[in-house]
Image (cartoon, rainbow, N blue to C red):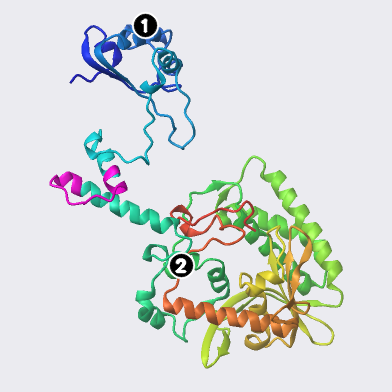
Amino acid sequence: MFVSKLVEARAARYQAVALLGLSEGLFPVVENPDPFLDEQSRHDLKMESRLERDQKSTFYQAFTRADTHLLLTRPYLSEDGEKWEPSPYWRAAEMLFTENAKTDKQTFIKRPLSEAASRQEFLFWNVQQGQPHNFADEELNSRFQNLAKAGGILDVRRAKRTNSVYEGDLTSLASLLGQQYSQEHNWSASRLEAYSNCPFRFFTSGVLGLDITKPIELGLDIRQIGTLYHRILELVYAQAANQGTNPLEILDDVAEGVFTNAPRWLGFRPTALWEVEKSQHLEKLHNSLEAMESERGSWQPIAFEAKFGSNGSPSLVLERDGDLVRIHGIIDRVDRNPDGEVRVIDYKTGSSNIGNRDLVEGTRLQLPVYAKAAELALELGEVVDGFYWLINAGSPSSLTLTKFKSEQGEGFDAACRIAINHIHNNVNMVRRGNFRAKTPQKGCAVYCPASIYCWRYQARSNNG
């Protein structure tokens, strides 16, 4: 048997000849110039020409090398499963033979193993036909084991419900996790919310402590923008309260100070448009702050970035059926009205609205947690309301604690009860080792540490 390129076989004759790859773009090959070596340089280096090759003559000589048998083959599907058109040489050859001369070899058609043209094809047919898997050839045995393992991995990846230790099923470690996350553990409010969105994200970031390490990049990402806005609003309201001034009057000066330190503080490189970007950020903050002030009425801000469960402040302790959950967090802002009533506000930079359904499904838990923390842990007064302030939209979210409605109840108490039940359920699932991956309805956050390897990862267009 002689195997070679066509040009090397055209000077001899053979009893049987097989020509491969007669599909569009393979033979004849599409001619493109070499981007690094021009044709004269290739000629001087005695390299094969890339242009003006006489492929018709080459095909004719190869086609006529056979004395008795001639086999022409072509792939009819591309690697991505799309139809692959035949080359003009194939079409020309079809005209010389009867229809019976052409055979389509479909992968699902069972064929004798003796016809396999390679070890890979032999193994594929063997599995397809359910044949015995004990081979005398050790290499075949080894390759089959690898194939079986790959098949098992593929089955797990294609399953709708995750059930693998590689995708968060750590029930075998329930005893250890129960000790690590006992009633003395101090939970993060945001982490518990993250568990509702995807337990596997909670596991990679909260349990393993992983994060996406990226080099300093040009411009701000969405998390950095959110941090920037939070810092500016915190300083504006704090200084306005101390000085007795209108927050809008000091916004420009406060923002400029934050902008100056932002590249070093947040770890990014300003682009050539940084000055333009600053003005755009400032315009959004102006519009949002103006809307927030017009909504404020008689409410007066009394606390900013109020921490509970850290720096010596007491944790929020939630109890259900004798089980205690301790929580720490940071409340963006707390307001009080002339009657001494309190409300909490949590800033969000995302453009998507936050509604009652988000709380019912457990994907937004921070607001009721902050309300309970302000009242019980920080003892700032009776909390009667709370809402998310959407900075980019310049409006409160449709989810407010006093106007909350669901099939499970209405109002402030119902909202808090639903959140507390979600939190206890999440904690119990963590202790049991259930971190099974799931794709959130709105897609996964691009900053999820598991995004580089999680099979369930589906990025969303807006990660607010």
Residue at image coords 23%, 6%:
11
Q: Is residue 154 magenta?
A: no
| Image quadrant where one finds the C terminus | bottom right
Q: Is residue 160 left or right of residue 248?
A: left
Res. 331 in view: no
Mark 1 or mark 2, whichever is nearer to me: 1
Q: Find residue 17 and report its horizontal and vertical position in percent.
A: 26, 17
For disc 1, the marked residue is: 57
Q: Find residue 205 and report its horizontal and vertical position in percent.
A: 47, 65
Residue at image coords 83%, 63%:
291
| Image quadrant where one finds the N terminus | top left
Q: Find residue 359 and report its horizontal and vertical position in percent.
A: 66, 73
Q: Which of 123 and 55 lies nearest the eye of the viewer?
A: 123
Q: Picture quarter containing residue 190?
A: bottom right
**CA gap, disc 1 and disc 2:** 61 Å
Residue ranking furthest to the bottom = 322
The magenta segment is 125-141
Residue at image coords 14%, 47%:
138
| Number of the label disc, if any, that sits on residue 436 | 2
Q: Picture quarter containing residue 286?
A: bottom right
